[in-house]
Amino acid sequence: MVAIEVKDMGLKFKLSRFKATRVKNVLQGFLSKTPETAQRDHFWALRNLNFTLNSGEVLGVIGSNGSGKSTLLRTMGGIFVPDEGTIEVTGRASALLSLGTGFKDDLNGKENIYLNATILGFTQEEINAVIEDIIAFSELHQFIYEPVKNYSSGMKARLGFAIAVHLKREVMLIDEILGVGDFKFRSKSTAKIKELINDDRTVILVSHSMESIRSYCTKCLWIDKGVQKAFGETEEVVAEYLKS
Amino acid sequence: MGSGRKEVRRYLLSTLITAKQYRASFRSILKYLVLGELKIKYKSRFLGILWALIDPLMLMLIYLVLVKFIFQRGGPTYAVELLTGLIAYRWFSTSIVQAAKALVSNGKLLQTVKFPFSVLPISKVLIGGVDMLVGFVILFIMVFFFDVEPTLNWLWLPVLLLIEFQFVIAFSLIVSIVGVYFRDLLNILQFGVRILLYLSPVLYNIEQLPADYQLLYTVLSPLAPLIDSFKRVLIFGQHPSPFIFVFIVLSAICWFIAIALYRGRPNIAKDL
């Protein structure tokens, strides 16, 4: 079964200096809107992407900084709507982008688990079923009842990671979260990610670590400046990328 | 044929998930946002929920001293008239100022997760609503000290609250989106709501205006029919102002704009 189908997909951003948030820009837009300026005031963050991923496959996305990897992940998660072409995701996708986004500093860890998970679209029952696992995995123990503002950045990251890996969807979007916390926690989290991936889920993994891409991914996509450079078997694409 | 059926199945799959779970997830996000923020707002403060009272009561005291003792104006029930107006006005003013920042200040979150983001401004209205209800409790106690007789017209109060509620929601939805594209909006609103206080019948009653201008004023001052109705019903034992219909028409227009804005901005995350 096809899990993700991307056809001629493109996504453009308006450059901030042309955004209609200033009187000057609005006026300029009215006065001098030629096709030429319309071309200049945005850039394509992604363009001409074409690939299909079957369910259960693990796709690694590689490319240099600012090449559009995270933007692609967000488009798969439904946060951005493509400006051209189509992207179809079968089943629900859950985003594990940056860990701990949406935490409220004054709420305690447990309350933040509920807040975060409901925003991710999980029901009360679904959360209740995994809350103990999340708390245990995060190793926060009694600190789970402390406000998050008193957490160290490592504690916050651990909690964010624990939430992300325990709330599962058919399609998981993972953005470089493999290295969280100290050495002990890192090996634990690597094991958890492995478990997720072997769980017959469709996983999209964005990473700079060729080591993890090689060991987890069945397919690999290389994008450069928003353009698809290569898509196919992991070993071949990675080799091509490293040569460039 | 085959691909057409596949399309249909995929479409059904996605609607089944959203239609059924959308509302449930909307409600639970709203619940945690509101409870969370109320906790932050009141539980971590020494005076707690009392802050919901202190603010309107202080304002009331200031105007009371100004009008009653310095200008020697205002009838025997002036204090409670003032508080009624202030509470109704404050729900609107605080909610819309908060709503104007609601999307912008959650930009990171909106760019990370897809969720029904209208909960962000709506949660601000509900939080303001809690302050408003606390204010009403005090108002009900005060009203008896000013010899205001309870009448059957008090039954209009929940109706008026609902009318205000839906209007504040519609207006908050509008400013939340406009605030993303037009960042000056917040400054304008902070300034605007202050002017609105004096343009609304909070410190005075409509009857005190020159007779020729009363009609024009009631139609043009956006909150006038509502605040006037609150005072009529609660303190003067009358029916709501007939001009409340002007207010309802205004709300309908706001809803129309709000829905158009939310429908037309699927890519809001890109503009944050």
Image (spheres, grey):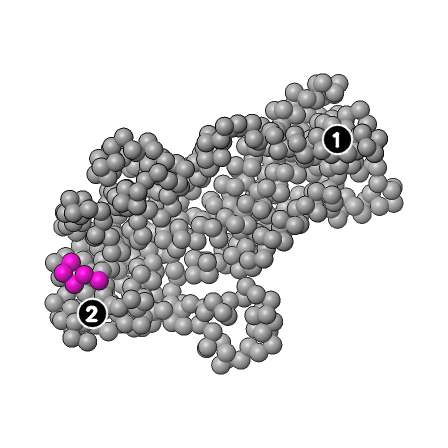
Residue on which disc 1 sits:
B64
Who's the residue at 34% across and 33% down the image? A146
The answer to whether the residues at label 2 and label 1 have Cβ atoms under 8 Å apart is no
Residue stretch rendered in magenta on the structure: A208-212
Who's the residue at 46% across and 77% down the image? A40
Front of the two marks 2 and 1: 1
Q: Is residue A211 magenta?
A: yes
B211 versus B44 height, above or below: below
Who's the residue at 18% across and 44% down the image? A185
Along the horizontal axis of the image, is A122 left or right of B151? Answer: left
Res. A195 visible in picture: no
Q: Chain of mark 2?
A: A
Residue on which disc 2 sits:
A231
CA–CA distance in space, label 2 to label 1 = 73 Å
Along the horizontal axis of the image, is A6 left or right of B19? Answer: left
Q: Quadrant of the C terminus of chain A?
A: bottom left
Question: Circle 2 — which element?
Answer: strand
The kind of residue tagged 1 is: Leu
**Whole-percent x, y for residue B148 in the image:** 74, 21
Q: Chain of mark 1?
A: B
**Whole-percent x, y for residue A131 in the image:** 27, 35
Q: Is residue A98 magenta?
A: no
Report the number of discs: 2
- Local packing at callout 2 (Cα closer than 10 Å; few below 14, some 14-19, many 20+) is many
Res. A152 visible in picture: yes
- Local packing at callout 1 (Cα closer than 10 Å; few below 14, some 14-19, many 20+) is many
Q: Quadrant of the N terminus of chain A?
A: bottom left
